[in-house]
Image: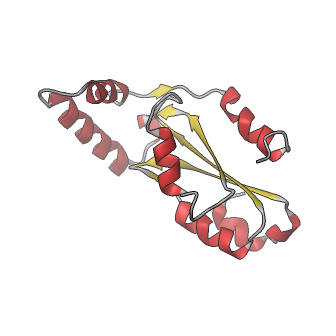
Amino acid sequence: MELSDVKKHDLNVYDAVVFGGWACAGKISKADKFKKLMAKYPGKKYAVYSTGASPLESPHISEFLSANFPESDYPGVRLFYFPAGFNYEKMPAPSRFMMKVFNKMLASKKDKTEEEKIMAEMIASSYDISDEKYIQPLVEYINGAGRV
């Protein structure tokens, strides 16, 4: 269900709650609203996932997830990342414009780092790196096989 619809339901009837949001500028979309919801329903098995343009192997994924849900503040919340890709055609116009400007600035930068070169290439056009296999660890966790 949409996060905005949660208030219409009693989450006490559920053992586990899964929240997902897309990655944008180092934040998981709507994560702050979900954190408030978590405070209302303590003791649940929580899982949080984010989708984004970075490949699963990116060394920044773990830092990104931990920055959004620090273990010290959210003990027991299990974090997941699903590579998805980048789709200019589905972006709102302001986001699309912002990304195109950012890409142009990055592409024209002199003495780019290797990471900046890769990023400029990645965001030059739309691409899809999603795969259903990425959700398997989350499914196993919710079903009990990946219990911590």
Could you tell me if residue 28 is visible in this image? no
Left or right side of 127 for 73:
right
**Quadrant in the rendering for residue 83:** top right
State how the image is colored.
secondary structure
Give me the residue at 28% from left, 38% from top.
100
Q: As rendered, which of 32 and 124 lies closer to the eye?
A: 32
Name the outermost residue toward the left: 110
Q: Quadrant of the N terminus?
A: bottom right
In terms of depth relative to the viewer, which is nearer, 90 or 107?
107
User: Residue 122, percent across and down?
Assistant: 37, 26
Left or right: where 63 falls relative to 46? left
- Examine the rendered structure and indicate whether residue 121 appears above or below residue 14: above
- Number of numbered markers: 0
| Residue under the image location 61 percent in, 62 percent down | 74
Which residue is pictured at 51% across the width and 42% down the height?
A: 62
Q: How far across and how far down the image is residue 92, in percent?
A: 41, 48
Residue at 78% x, 40% y is 139
Residue 120 against residue 47 in the figure, above or below: above
Up the image or down, 68 lies above or below 117; here it is: below
Left or right for 70, reference 93? right
Please state if 90 lies on the left or on the right of 142 as rendered: left
Whole-percent x, y for residue 76 in the image: 69, 57
Q: Establish if 19 lies above or below 100.
A: below
Extreme-bottom residue of the structure: 40
Using the rendered view, name the quadrant where residue 123 is placed. top left
**Is residue 137 in view?**
yes
